[in-house]
Image: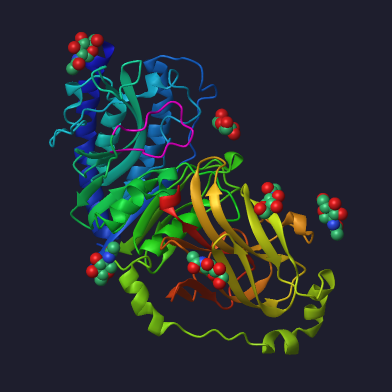
Amino acid sequence: MLLKYSVPHRFMADITFGSSCILVLLCYQVLTVDVPREGHYVAAVYEHHVILNPNPTAITDRQSALELMNRNLDIYEEQVMAAAKQGAQIIIFPEDGIHGFNFTRTSIYPYLDFLPYPLSVNWNPCKEGYLFNDTEVLHRLSCMALKNQVFLVANMGTKQDCTHSDPHCPPDGRYQFNTDVVFSDSGALIARYRKQNLYFEYAFNTPPEIDYTIFDTPFAGQFGLFTCFDILFYEPAVNLIMQHNVKQVAYPTAWMNQLPLLSAIEFQRAFATAFNINLLAANIHHPDLGMTGSGIYTLSKSFAYYNMKSFSGKLIVAEIPVVLEHKTHMNNTVINNIQTSFPSFHTDTQVCYKDNEKACDAISKHVSKEASPFFYGEMMYDNFTLRAITEPKGDIHICSNTLCCYLSYQRLVLSDELYVLGAFDDLHTVHGTYYVQACVLVKCGGLNYTTCGQEVTQATGLIDFQLQGNFSTAFVFPLLLRSGVTLDSADYLGWKNNYYVMQKKGGSSGLVTAGLYGRWYEKD
Ligand SMILES: *[C@@H]1O[C@H](CO)[C@@H](O)[C@H](O)[C@H]1NC(C)=O
Ligand SMILES: *[C@@H]1O[C@H](CO)[C@@H](O)[C@H](O)[C@H]1NC(C)=O
Ligand SMILES: *[C@@H]1O[C@H](CO)[C@@H](O)[C@H](O)[C@H]1NC(C)=O
Ligand SMILES: *[C@@H]1O[C@H](CO)[C@@H](O)[C@H](O)[C@H]1NC(C)=O
Ligand SMILES: *[C@@H]1O[C@H](CO)[C@@H](O)[C@H](O)[C@H]1NC(C)=O
Ligand SMILES: *[C@@H]1O[C@H](CO)[C@@H](O)[C@H](O)[C@H]1NC(C)=O
């Protein structure tokens, strides 16, 4: 009853405030915000420090659930306004940013909005909030988009009744989905995406059929949409890009960093680079849970954020180019063309021997001068085959199953640090099952070989290198991470015959990870 009346009230308030706000903003924009350059648009992502339910498995009621979610939505509202003031035309919020996580199927129920589907083209929850019950979250998000005239992408929990004539219908007679929703700048609900690859989220169902969600914008054309763990799988992410020709992706995530290969910004950047797309990635900010790392990634430039010290959220706003052409490193036609332009790689002995003779000796003291034997080491629960870098320069290789990885290297700054070349070609089975082929050059946790594969965030070693592998999959994601978990880009990436190659000379800080992370989707 209370609900029935409160919705129109909110609606009135929003419209009144909305129109005055829009007027203010327009004036403000004219005075202080440049209109984006031709072929560009302004995108925003918000890394949100989600206010969590301290006891997510306890059963609560809708009113209490809304109280908690409204506290998060209050922050969203401030950020949408801040982004709009900077000229943002689209803003992305992270996965689980409104309701939090660690619920059970029952305890999340009061947090779920009803999401009508199929989407009636014209439903505008802000203007027509009275049409459906249990749509308070949709209503608030819609009003934020309308008031600030921005496209808005957010993640929330939704419910949908089903009957037992539907063979997929859960026994309790309803679906519960981890859902991304998209509102246009007039507040209309224009798209939804239900997460396909759930990450041990027992509160939610996998949708009975895969959502390939694409939405259209007047400023940048089409965007694809998927969520968090989806980024590691073929469906729907790769299919959207390869078959549906998506060139820009909005990506809500709640990603726990895992070094050395799966830190949030590291993989976000690798994904955008591999497919040559714009990726707008918004992560949860919870350093105590290992969650930070968001960014706006374009073909030429990245605006990434990683901060383990701050305990508040972060808004990233950037003017970026609309992607028109779409050449991925994964297209075989492109692969063949690249071969001719492949540069040769020479390690230059000068730096080490002439300038740094003492340092060269220093590093050699710790490890044998002999070509080191291979050994096994666990990296992110996978049994990698490893070989240590023992010389100031050299060529080494290491194989695992059918994958062989080759490294030509030259250490520039000779630090007291141990680096290894590693290969892995097998099914990953812990916290998800997926087939990985990886060639990596990583810094170990210490000087003992048993420390290789550990999580390391700081390094001083500078290494010129060419890393390559004869992958069986075309889907190779290039990783390049430096000290302090900062991103770098390779000098060269691409295929040479049957080898995927990464080259890099120099660098601004120590090397933490250089990697070619291949996903062999057919073998999952
Ligand atoms: C959620 O669950 C994970 C794994 O079970 C745990 O590590 C984490 O601390 C929990 N987070 C909260 C906020 O309860
Ligand atoms: C909303 O819920 C109320 C109370 O349960 C019910 O009377 C009403 O018919 C519902 N409205 C809609 C649109 O479903
Ligand atoms: C690869 O690129 C060529 C030329 O740009 C194009 O015709 C072809 O459709 C692309 N193939 C895939 C699978 O994207
Ligand atoms: C890693 O793989 C090798 C070769 O198959 C095996 O001998 C070794 O026991 C494995 N190590 C672990 C920790 O599973
Ligand atoms: C990769 O190279 C190794 C060594 O030459 C070879 O044994 C293996 O079959 C190759 N793998 C593929 C997929 O060609
Ligand atoms: C390396 O670590 C292992 C296990 O912690 C230990 O047994 C071994 O003695 C260490 N080796 C050296 C050279 O310190």
Which residue appears at 37% of the width and 29% of the height? 205
Task: Give coordinates of residue 301: x percent, y percent.
Answer: 41, 67
- Residue 318 in which image quadrant: bottom left
Image quadrant containing the N terminus: top left
Side of 108 relative to 395 (left or right): left
Question: Which residue is at the front of the view, 257 or 452?
Answer: 452
Q: Residue at x 20, y 46 (%)?
A: 23
Q: Residue at x 61, y 49 (%)?
A: 380
Q: Nearer the viewer, residue 178 or 453?
A: 453
Q: Quadrant of residue 466?
A: bottom right
Answer above or below: position of 21 versus 319: above
Q: Position of residue 138 (x, y in %)?
A: 28, 31
The picture places residue 54, in percent across and down from the top left corner, at 55, 24
Residue at position x 78%, y 62% from top?
447
Q: Majority secondary structure of the magenta segment?
A: loop
Look at the image and say whether residue 102 sits in the magenta stretch: no
Residue numbers of the magenta segment: 193-208
Residue 465 shows up from this direction: yes
Instruction: In this rendered view, identify the residue nearer to me: 494 or 317.
Output: 494
View quadrant of ligand 6: bottom right
Instruction: Judge whether residue 488 can be spotted in this image.
Output: no
Give the residue furthest to the top.
1
Assess whether residue 203 is covered by the magenta stretch.
yes
Q: Please, is residue 491 above or below residue 22 in the view?
A: below
How many labels sit on residues? 0
Question: How did the renderer colour the structure?
Answer: rainbow
